[in-house]
Amino acid sequence: MSAVNAQEAESTRPAEALGWMQGQWQGEGWIIDRGGERRTFTVDESVRAAAQGHVLQIHGVGRSDGRVIHDAAGFVTAGADGFEMQAVNMYGQALTAPMQVTDNGFAWQLPMGDYGRVEYVAEYDGEHWIETGSWCPTGGECMQNFRMQLTRTGAVD
């Protein structure tokens, strides 16, 4: 690999492009469930680089009323067409979706077949990781159904 190609490969590593995410995070948020009820939760996120920065591992656990309501792992990798998010939730459901790195965060979509999609947008303001989600039914307008705000509590252990 020539020096130029090595530099190009280095700049496409998820751990470099999303370096601000690495560490331990805590916060809270809300979600509108399928029944239309708004539920609040607390969340802990752990983000670390692996495989020399070619993978960014994300693990999040959300709790509401003392119960785990969300437990998911995500793996951000660089594909031929840009970054990809590979995610698995606590029910064993898995998906791979394109992930766009933005100037101050990232965006990705969760396809829901004929029903529509959920769009996620995350921003880092230098102090907080703020992520929102919007339900976008096929043929209809998007409606925000998720928001969380996290604060870094420590470095990667």
Image: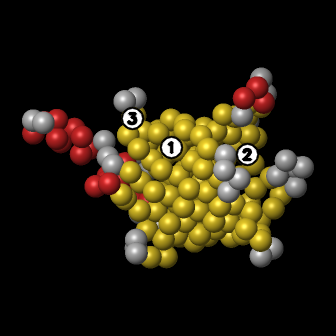
| Pointers 1 and 3 in contact (C-beta within 8 Å) | no
Residue 126 in view (yes/no) = no
Quadrant of image for the N terminus: top left
Callout 3 crowding tier (Cα within 10 Å): few <14, some 14–19, many ≥20: few
Q: Amino acid at mark 1?
A: Met
Q: Position of residue 80 (x, y in %)?
A: 37, 30
For residue 122, side relative to residue 36 (left or right) = left
Task: Please name the residue shown 24% across and 45% down the image.
Answer: 10
Task: Please name the residue shown 57% across and 47% down the image.
Answer: 87
Q: Which residue is mark 1?
A: 85
Q: Amino acid at mark 3?
A: Gly
Query: 68 or 138: which is nearer to us?
Result: 68
Q: Which residue is mark 2?
A: 144
| Pointers 2 and 1 in contact (C-beta within 8 Å) | no
Tally the marks: 3
Q: Nearer the viewer, mark 2 or mark 1?
A: 1
